[in-house]
Every structure is written in structure tokens, then in C-alpha cells.
């Protein structure tokens, strides 16, 4: 087995690792530059879950050489070998990346001109001499492509980022919509926080109001081109077309023979002694499945068999290939089988969804103290250590930092902003936590104070801006086994507290890394969820409610919330609630208790639906979705496998509103696994039932009372 020196640390820690192919060798890419790719290069990516299981991605820029793409394929095969043949392998082509790949970069990816062969190195962090123009495309999966630094590159329908190093300008065309502005802003914030370590200044610029600095960089302004339609989206009607082929080398050379001409397929068609190609080329997807008892030559040639298949079929070169070991099948692959069953179907959507070898993975409870002894168990992407370093927390008050008493560490209030300095053996991290109900002044002050603190420490700390509800796993582990407790509104300021409600409800959920957080939600029985634990405080009692699908870690975390309230708690199991508990919650109401919460290996999926181009477009939201992924000018489709929800945004056009039931019906009917006849629920923004909101952690019914664009602008 070939072992490259870069493989020594590969897959040892959960999270993402990226290498660039340089002179036909592997060169690691620094974390601060993750999501930035040169169009003339090839890259190798490894994503490791805490199970552990692995995804290997080979990314090819549109201008990369044949030698580089060949080297990437060889390294991908060697890494797969090194990790025991269990990873899922993906071939990614620029502009046509898989949803799995895009999910690693929630605020988008950037394509830069050039590459190794033309002497282009990765941007130096903190480099203030940058001069580039990025064209932002996409609503769900965000791509920023470097284009010529000229007014000819602009159009009225899109957002652009004019990056001048110290100053980063987000330019918005007169015809671009609000959701695109929102996503472009997230990418601009990422450039400032990652590439410039918080040192660049962000500016929002409207078409026609360009400041002198932009004119100086681009020259005198010329006419701006009209908006261009997006024509590269996938038409979901193709998804019912799949064919199954068997790969064999019994004759001495690889041959491909048809097993079934169209989907849905039966799982029994896959023999453990063989390898197969599932052809969904009309939708630009090819899957290669490796039987666990297939011969080694067939298994090793899986990716090259997929590439050859694309050539033989004359499919577009941007066709995606996924190579799947038995036990590591993706949702998209399983969707083509009408009777797919995994061993131990027990994974619920709020639990770690493990890719690969589901049956062999023991569910190990998270324990931050044993992180060093068992790294695969605890850490997630960004887990630099076990959280036992030194921590200082300040609250932002009147533009200054006020120390928080250590006794209340771990409690965060939605009306405040906090700065957390974490110091450990390798350096420092500054977390800036911004509450959803904090004022514009506090948001601005928290950003300024973070840079000030960073400067006072010589610019060495890593800065992490955290919006309430999006806390990274490492931040959640700093409180050493206690949950991070997030209070809905109010503030922890001395003398500035708003009186807490007499009845309060906290939703306790374990993240995929094992850390827990307790988020205050509306004190109503409709907020409950069968998969989690809730703590209810009434004027006279404290109840701890255990949903049937709750984990032991969630039950343990509830004790800390009870300690905060003081006194003893009454433990209540779902289905055995006393009458006084229901009356405290305003009576028993419908809540999220879908049977799929306890027996489900298919995670829920969220799609944006649009027929603005005159045909049905269904585009998946990549990565873990949140409430803020619901675009208010679209119809969104939530697929929870045994039910379909259509969410109609207030600004969705009339055609989308009236066509919503047709969109859902067409989505279900074109599903290769044959799910037609599923219940379809159409709901309106602002009137969501608990059966819908229960799929989102800590749903905020007041989220849309403030403009999301104003919220993100406050982070500039």
C-alpha cells in the first residue's frame, strides 16, 4: 500500500482537510483559505466525521492540466486505500460541484484565476495589496468567480465584490434580489474575517452610487450590461431516469452490462461480489457502488470505470461521479431504490448522521475530558483542543468591554453581544457572539472591540464571529460538559435585566459533535419535539420532559438548566405528562412527534422551488439547513421522507403561490424511489405549524419581524 507523508495526519481529526496538487505532489491549504480554489489547479479534499467515516473529493478546475487531474485521481485512490477502502469518493468539476461539497462552505466558494503552473500562490493571509473583482452567482449554493477587473464584467442582475485589500466593496446591481444580497454579504464577511483576520473594512454599494475608490480601481464607469438569466440549474423532472449496470473484469478487461433499464430498483439487484454503475447521466450524476466481496481490481478501478462510462455515453465532462462502498451509500443513491433498508435504522435527524459503516459504529457519548485519548470520538471540524484552556468573557456595554462574572460563564442573552478570549497551548481564539436581539450599536461595537483586542495581542489570534443559534462545536465545549444556555431576549447587564417570564421553556439538543446547548423557546406545548429534552419552569415547579428519542447527553445537560432555576425537578416521560404541566404550556397541542424521528436514516432535506424561468426548478440547500435558509421570495420544500411540506414565502410570486401544490406533486412523482401519494402540506410564512418548525432547532417565530438584510448589514 502506497502511503504519502501527507496521509499520516489524514482523517485523524473530524473536519475538513484540503491539499492542492503542486508539481504533481500534495501541498496542504491553510484553514483560513478553505473555500478558495484556483481555476488552473486540481485539489484533494478529505472530510472526516466523528464516527469516523470519510468523504474524499477530487476537485478539478476548468483550466487544470491533464497531468494534474491524473495526479489528483491517483492520490484519491491512494488515500481511499490508506483509509481502508471505506470512504465515499466524489469527482468534482468547477461550477458543477455536488451538494455535499458545497455544504462544507456555507458562505460560498471562490474561484480565482491562474494556478500553480502560472506561478499563482494562495493569497497571503492579512495581505492588504489584493486587487480583484468577484462575480457572485447562486441563491442556495454560492459561487464567487474572479473576473476581469473591468466595468464590462458587471451586470445589473448580480452582486459583485470589489476587493481592494483594506477595503472590500459589495456592489449590488439594480435588479439583484434581496436573498442574493444576503448571501453575497455572507461571502464578503468571510473574506474580511478569514483572509484579512478582521482587518478589512466592508462597504455596501448600490449601482449608480459608486465611491471614488471603485472608480479609481476600475477606471471611468461605462454602461452596465442587463441582467443575465441563470440557465445552469437542474430540472428535477430528469430525476426519474436511472439505469443500473454491472462492472466485471472476468473476461480480462473491464466490461459493463445492463441490469435494469430504469428506476426504481430493488436493493437485491446489488450482489456483494460485484461492482455496479447507477447511471443518472441525464441529471449529470454517475454512481459507482463497490460490493464488499468484489475483487480488488474492480474495486480499485471504480473511479476510472466511472470516467470511462461518461466518455462512452458522451455525457458532459462536468458529470459528477460518486464512488460508494457498501454501507456508505448517500441519500441521493438510496433514493433510486424503492425498498432500501440500512442495518440498525436508528439515526434520527437531530442526531449525528453518520456516512459509512452505519452498522459498525458504536454510539459513543461525548466526553470532552477524553478528547486527547480518543480523538475520533469527540472533536468536530474546528476542534483545536478539548476546551480546557483559559477563557475570559466580556459583555459589550456602551461601546466598551465589561467583564462577565465567571459564575455566569456559559449563559448568553439574546439582547447582548459577548467577546470570548480563549487561550491554549497553540495560541488564542477570539469568539464574538452576537445575540439576535442586540442593538445595531452593540453589533458594531462588538466588531470594533474584537479587532482592538486582536491588535493588542499582535494580530495573532484566530477570530470567529458567531451569530446566536450558529455556535461552533468548539465554543460549546468551553463550558466543560455543561450546556451552553441561550436565553431568548433580555440582557445580563447589571441593572438592565428585563424581568424574566414566570413560565419559561428550554429546548436541549445535542449537536452532531456531541456538545449540547439549551435554547429558550416559546413556552407552548407546540414547541416540544419527541427527539429532545425540554426543561419547563413554572411559578411553582420545574419539569424535565424526556422525548422518546432523547439522548443520555441531553438528559444530563437538563440537570444544569435545573440547577440554574434552583430546587428539585419533576422528571416526565413523553406520554405520561401530568395535567399541571399541560396547563402551564397553555394546554396540550400538536407538536413534532413524527415516527421518522425515532427510525430514520434519511436526513430531512430542504429545497428552494422556483418557476421564475418558466419551468420547474428545484435546488437543494447544501449542508445543515437553518431557519435563515428559508428564502422569503421563494416556495421552499421540506422533505422529511414520510411527508412533504411546502413553505410559501410572503414575497413569492403569484405563479409560484398558485403552482405550489403542482411543484410538490411533481417533486414526489419524479422521485426515483416511487413515493407518489405522500401527504403534501402547504403552509404560509408566519403561520407555520409545529410539525414543520420542529425540524428546525430553536425556531424563532419573530425572526422576520426585522429585515434579514438589516441584520447582516449590522455585521459590516
Image (cartoon, rainbow, N blue to C red):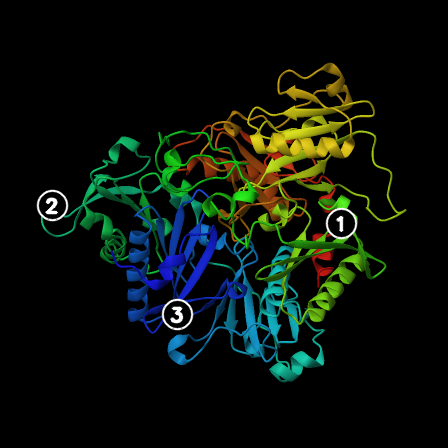
Sequence-wise, which precedes: disc 2 or disc 3? 3
Where is mark 1, residue-wise?
Answer: 706
**Horizontal arrangement in the rendering, residue 466 relative to residue 99 (left or right):** right
Foreground residue among 682 and 227: 682
> How many other residues sit within 10 Å of disc 3, few (<14), some (14-19) or many (≥20)?
many
**Horizontal arrangement in the rendering, residue 637 relative to residue 269 (left or right):** right
Residue 387 in percent (x, y) is at 60, 50
**Local SS, label 2:** loop
Where is mark 2, residue-wise?
Answer: 250
**Which residue is drawn at the image coordinates 72% and 42% (left, top)?**
486
Q: Are marks 2 and 1 in contact (CB under 8 Å)?
A: no
Foreground residue among 422 and 149: 422
Residue 619 visible in the displayed image: yes
Q: Place residue 577 in its image quadrant.
A: top right
**Which residue is drawn at the image coordinates 28% and 42% (left, top)?**
243
Q: Are marks 3 and 1 in contact (CB under 8 Å)?
A: no
Classify 573 as above or below 351. Answer: above
Residue 589 in percent (x, y) is at 69, 22
Where is mark 3, residue-wise?
Answer: 41
Foreground residue among 259 and 249: 249
Q: Place residue 186 in its image quadrant.
A: bottom right
Residue 617 in percent (x, y) is at 49, 48
Classify 63 as above or below 674. Answer: below
**Horizontal arrangement in the rendering, residue 465 relative to residue 90 (left or right):** right
Sequence-wise, which precedes: disc 2 or disc 1? 2
Q: Which mark is residue 162?
A: none
Q: Nearer the viewer, mark 3 or mark 1?
A: 3
> How many other residues sit within 10 Å of disc 2, few (<14), some (14-19) or many (≥20)?
few
Residue 415 in percent (x, y) is at 79, 48
Classify 468 as above or below 273. Answer: below
Amino acid at each position: 500500500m502506497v502511503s504519502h507523508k501527507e496521509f499520516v495526519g489524514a482523517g485523524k481529526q473530524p473536519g475538513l482537510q484540503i491539499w492542492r496538487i503542486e508539481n504533481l505532489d500534495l501541498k496542504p491549504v491553510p484553514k483560513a483559505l478553505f473555500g478558495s480554489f484556483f481555476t488552473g489547479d486540481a485539489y484533494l479534499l478529505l472530510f472526516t466525521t466523528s464516527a469516523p467515516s470519510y468523504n474524499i473529493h477530487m476537485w478539478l478546475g476548468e483550466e487544470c492540466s491533464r497531468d494534474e487531474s491524473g495526479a489528483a485521481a491517483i492520490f484519491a485512490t491512494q488515500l481511499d486505500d490508506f483509509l481502508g477502502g471505506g470512504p465515499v469518493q466524489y469527482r468534482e468539476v468547477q461550477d458543477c460541484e455536488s451538494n455535499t461539497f458545497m455544504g462544507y462552505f456555507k458562505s460560498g466558494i471562490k474561484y480565482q484565476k491562474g494556478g500553480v503552473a502560472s506561478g499563482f500562490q494562495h493569497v497571503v493571509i492579512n495581505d492588504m495589496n489584493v486587487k480583484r473583482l468577484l462575480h457572485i452567482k447562486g441563491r442556495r449554493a454560492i459561487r464567487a468567480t474572479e473576473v476581469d477587473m473591468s466595468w464590462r464584467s458587471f451586470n445589473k442582475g448580480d452582486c459583485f465584490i470589489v476587493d481592494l485589500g483594506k477595503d472590500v466593496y459589495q456592489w449590488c446591481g439594480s435588479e439583484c434580489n434581496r436573498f442574493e444580497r444576503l448571501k453575497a454579504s455572507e461571502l464578503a464577511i468571510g473574506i474580511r474575517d478569514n483572509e484579512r483576520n478582521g482587518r478589512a473594512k466592508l462597504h455596501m454599494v448600490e449601482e449608480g452610487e459608486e465611491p471614488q475608490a471603485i472608480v479609481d480601481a476600475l477606471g471611468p464607469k461605462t454602461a452596465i450590461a442587463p441582467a443575465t438569466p441563470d440557465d445552469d440549474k437542474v430540472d428535477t423532472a430528469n430525476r426519474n431516469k436511472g439505469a443500473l449496470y454491472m462492472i466485471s473484469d472476468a473476461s480480462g478487461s473491464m466490461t459493463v452490462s445492463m441490469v435494469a433499464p430504469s428506476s426504481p430498483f430493488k436493493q437485491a439487484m446489488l450482489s456483494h461480489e460485484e461492482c455496479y454503475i447507477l447511471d443518472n447521466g441525464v441529471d449529470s450524476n454517475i454512481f459507482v457502488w463497490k460490493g464488499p466481496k468484489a475483487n480488488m481490481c474492480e474495486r480499485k478501478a471504480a473511479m476510472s470505470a466511472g470516467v470511462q462510462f461518461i466518455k462512452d455515453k458522451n455525457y458532459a465532462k462536468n458529470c459528477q461521479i460518486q464512488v460508494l462502498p457498501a454501507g456508505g451509500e448517500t441519500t441521493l443513491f438510496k433514493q433510486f431504490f424503492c425498498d432500501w433498508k440500512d442495518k440498525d435504522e436508528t439515526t434520527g435527524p437531530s442526531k449525528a448522521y453518520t456516512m459509512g459503516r452505519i452498522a459498525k459504529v458504536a454510539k459513543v457519548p461525548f466526553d470532552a475530558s477524553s478528547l486527547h485519548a480518543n480523538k475520533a470520538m469527540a472533536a468536530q471540524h474546528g476542534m483545536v483542543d478539548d476546551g480546557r484552556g483559559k477563557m475570559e468573557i466580556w459583555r459589550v456595554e456602551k461601546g466598551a468591554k465589561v467583564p462577565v462574572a465567571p459564575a455566569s460563564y456559559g449563559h448568553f442573552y439574546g439582547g447582548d453581544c459577548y467577546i470570548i478570549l480563549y487561550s491554549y497551548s497553540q495560541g488564542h481564539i477570539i469568539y464574538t457572539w452576537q445575540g439576535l436581539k442586540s442593538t445595531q450599536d452593540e453589533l458594531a461595537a462588538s466588531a470594533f472591540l474584537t479587532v482592538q483586542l486582536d491588535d493588542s495581542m499582535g494580530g495573532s489570534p484566530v477570530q470567529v464571529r458567531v451569530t446566536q443559534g450558529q455556535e461552533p462545536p468548539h465554543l460549546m465545549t468551553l463550558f466543560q460538559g455543561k450546556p451552553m444556555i441561550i436565553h431568548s431576549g433580555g440582557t445580563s447587564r447589571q441593572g438592565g435585566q428585563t424581568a424574566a417570564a414566570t413560565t419559561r421553556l428550554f429546548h436541549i439538543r445535542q449537536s452532531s459533535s456531541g456538545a449540547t446547548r439549551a435554547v429558550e423557546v416559546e413556552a407552548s406545548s407546540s414547541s416540544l419535539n419527541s427527539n429532545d429534552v425540554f426543561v419547563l419552569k413554572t411559578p411553582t415547579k420545574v419539569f424535565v420532559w424526556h422525548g422518546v428519542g432523547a439522548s443520555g447527553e441531553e438528559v444530563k445537560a437538563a440537570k444544569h438548566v435545573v440547577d440554574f432555576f434552583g430546587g428539585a425537578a419533576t422528571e416526565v416521560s413523553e406520554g405520561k405528562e401530568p395535567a399541571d404541566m399541560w396547563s402551564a404550556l397553555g394546554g396540550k397541542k400538536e407538536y413534532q412527534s413524527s415516527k421518522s424521528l425515532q427510525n430514520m436514516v434519511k436526513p430531512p432535506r430542504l429545497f428552494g422551488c422556483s418557476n421564475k424561468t418558466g419551468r420547474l426548478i428545484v435546488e437543494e440547500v447544501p449542508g445543515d439547513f437553518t431557519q435563515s435558509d428559508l428564502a422569503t421570495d421563494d416556495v421552499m420544500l421540506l422533505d422529511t421522507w414520510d411527508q412533504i411540506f411546502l413553505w410559501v414565502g410572503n414575497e413569492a410570486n403569484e405563479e409560484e403561490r398558485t403552482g405550489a401544490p403542482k411543484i410538490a406533486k411533481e417533486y414526489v412523482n419524479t422521485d426515483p424511489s416511487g413515493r407518489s401519494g405522500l401527504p403534501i402540506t402547504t403552509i404560509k410564512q408566519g403561520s407555520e405549524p409545529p410539525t414543520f418548525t420542529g425540524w428546525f432547532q430553536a425556531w424563532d417565530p419573530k425572526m422576520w419581524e426585522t429585515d434579514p438584510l438589516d441584520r447582516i448589514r449590522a455585521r459590516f
